[in-house]
Image: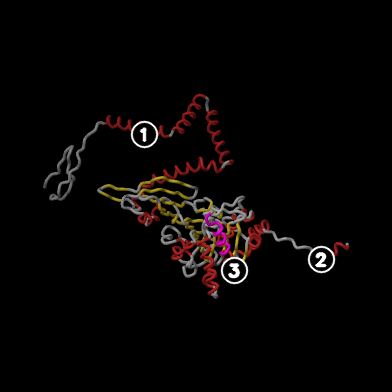
């Protein structure tokens, strides 16, 4: 048996098999202890100098506190500590938006970025997103981190050869690895993806009706809240909106939230609202608003007549604008017309009179194809988003999917692959306290769905809107009462 080679520079790994191929270790060079100490002290000094150079503000604060303690004593140091703390508290109490933008948001973002950096390697390795190539382990690179009170948005540069689908397949691993409720993979620039981590659910509780704004912005009407805690605003001018949701999903609250946000422009004569309400339930509760500032129709024949009349008015207005205007600007002479259609499926698919159905479908198709440039918008709501129910579904650029009954309906409503990108509309809770009003939005310019919740406009809120903006005129006193008062 061969004896193992022993030595200071080369050594064979011990192996009980005498016929095994020798395995050689790299040479070992002895370094003096004083050289190691000098090198480590130099490294420590370099790191300390770099830390001080990167944190000048913190260095200045510490230096001022130390000098105050040495030359004045603890009262000055206590004043230097409590003074900024009081000013910061007053700032946060008096100007919360400015404090959040200047202090809280940057501090939160730095903290969350450090949190992701600390766990990044372990999560990538365990989540099987690390790639081994030529003996090296390649990790997706952590980029910019943006944090809010509810979500984190993390930019990730992928390893060459990886795709967004590889990351989407590991979304659950990433969510659990970083302690988030869920993780969505958003599209970003080529070679990179955007990870959206939801830490807290901003939509868990019912959102009360939003205050009526002083001014109505037709491109950003506040109707609820987004998943990241920011206000959810809907654009109506220059587009059409389709809302789909099962019974009890909260479509009525969303419709009334839109009407509520439009009220200042409606009262000013800049917006004319029309209501087609074949169910005679949701829009009829605030019919006074439509009767005073626009029109209301419930009978299918009356609805067809109303829509056809708007088609004729729209075409006449288009002929008037031809060669003069390419876009519409709302004015009292040419107001922006918003047509609310509740249960549009009954009018286009379920009504027994086929000629009447064809008239309504033709009118809606004309309004949705020609109305955007001349100041017309159609807001339609239905329960079943199948093409057989609403053949003109693709004519609505912006769509909102509330709670749906089947997973396939999500892609029908929001486009192919929407459910894979995180639009789980079929999993919204049936409990009204947690699921009513929750929806996923897909805009024409952004294929990634966004989770939102509409504010709940209750019956007292609608009655208050009608009482304040469309009061019922008082009836004249009866002739008998007048004569009795004269005789008295």
Q: In terms of secondary structure, where does tag 3 sit?
A: helix
User: Residue shown at 25%/48% (left/top)?
Assistant: 134
In this rendering, is residue 151 above or below 475?
above
Q: In terms of secondary structure, where does tag 1 sit?
A: helix
Q: Which residue is mark 1?
A: 47
Q: Disc 1 and disc 2: Cα gap in Å?
A: 96 Å
Q: Which residues are magenta?
A: 311-323
Q: Nearer the viewer, mark 1 or mark 2?
A: 2
Give the mark, 3 or 1, whose residue is nearer the N terminus: 1
Q: Which residue is mark 3?
A: 305
Which sits in the foreground, 293 or 287?
293
- Residue 215, image x and y in percent? 60, 50
Q: Main secondary structure of the magenta part?
A: helix
Give the mark, 1 or 2, whose residue is nearer the N terminus: 1
Q: Disc 2 and disc 3: Cα gap in Å?
A: 39 Å
- Residue 467, image x and y in percent? 68, 58
- Residue 161, image x and y in percent? 31, 52
Label 1 crowd (10 A; few <14 / some 14-19 / many >=20): few
Q: In terms of secondary structure, where does tag 2 sit?
A: helix
Looking at this view, name the residue that lies furthest to the top: 71
Give the mark, 2 or 3, whose residue is nearer the N terminus: 3
Q: Which residue is mark 2?
A: 479
User: Residue shown at 60%/62% (left/top)?
Assistant: 274
- Residue 473, image x and y in percent? 72, 60
Left or right side of 34 for 237: right
Q: Nearer the viewer, mark 2 or mark 3?
A: 3
């Amino acid at each position: 048996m061969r004896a193992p080679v022993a030595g200071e520079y080369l050594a064979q790994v011990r192996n009980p098999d005498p016929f095994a191929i020798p395995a050689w270790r790299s040479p070992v060079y002895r370094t003096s202890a004083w050289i190691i100490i000098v090198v480590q002290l130099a490294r420590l000094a370099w790191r300390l100098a770099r830390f001080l150079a990167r944190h000048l503000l913190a260095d200045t604060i510490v230096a001022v506190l130390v000098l105050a303690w040495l030359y004045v004593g603890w009262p000055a140091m206590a004043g230097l500590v409590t003074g900024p703390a009081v000013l910061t508290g007053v700032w946060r109490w008096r100007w919360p938006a400015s404090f959040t933008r200047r202090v809280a948001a940057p501090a939160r973002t730095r903290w969350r970025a450090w949190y992701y950096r600390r766990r990044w390697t372990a999560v990538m390795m365990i989540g099987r997103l690390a790639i081994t190539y030529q003996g090296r382990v390649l990790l997706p690179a952590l980029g910019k981190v943006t944090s809010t009170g509810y979500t984190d948005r993390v930019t990730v540069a992928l390893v060459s050869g990886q795709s967004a689908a590889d990351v989407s397949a590991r979304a659950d691993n990433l969510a659990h690895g970083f302690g988030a409720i869920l993780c969505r993979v958003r599209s970003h620039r080529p070679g990179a993806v955007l990870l959206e981590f939801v830490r807290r659910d901003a939509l868990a509780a019912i959102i009360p009706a939003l205050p009526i704004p002083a001014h109505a912005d037709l491109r950003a009407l506040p109707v609820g809240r987004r998943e990241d805690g920011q206000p959810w605003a809907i654009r109506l001018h220059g587009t059409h909106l389709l809302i789909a949701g099962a019974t009890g999903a909260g479509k009525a609250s969303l419709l009334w939230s839109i009407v509520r946000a439009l009220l200042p422009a409606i009262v000013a004569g800049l917006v004319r609202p029309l209501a087609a309400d074949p169910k005679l339930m949701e829009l009829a509760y605030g019919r006074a608003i439509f009767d005073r500032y626009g029109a209301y129709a419930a009978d299918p024949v009356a609805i067809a007549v109303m829509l056809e009349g708007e088609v004729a008015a729209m075409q006449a207005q288009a002929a008037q604008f031809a060669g003069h205007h390419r876009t519409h600007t709302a004015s009292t002479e040419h107001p922006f017309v918003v047509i609310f259609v509740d249960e549009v499926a009954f009018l286009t698919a379920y009504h027994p009179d086929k000629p009447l159905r064809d008239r309504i479908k033709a009118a809606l198709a004309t309004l949705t194809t020609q109305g955007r440039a001349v100041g017309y918008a159609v807001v339609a709501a239905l329960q079943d988003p199948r093409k057989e129910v609403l053949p003109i579904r693709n004519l609505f650029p912006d769509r909102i999917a509330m709670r749906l009954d089947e997973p396939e309906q999500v892609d029908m409503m929001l486009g192919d692959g929407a459910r894979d990108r995180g639009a789980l509309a079929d999993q919204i809770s049936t409990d009204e306290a947690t699921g009513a009003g929750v929806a996923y939005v897909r805009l024409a310019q952004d294929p990634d769905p966004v989770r939102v919740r509409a504010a709940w406009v209750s019956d007292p809120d609608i009655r208050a809107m009608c009482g304040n903006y469309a009061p019922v005129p008082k009836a004249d006193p009866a002739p008998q009462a007048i004569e009795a008062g004269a005789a008295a």
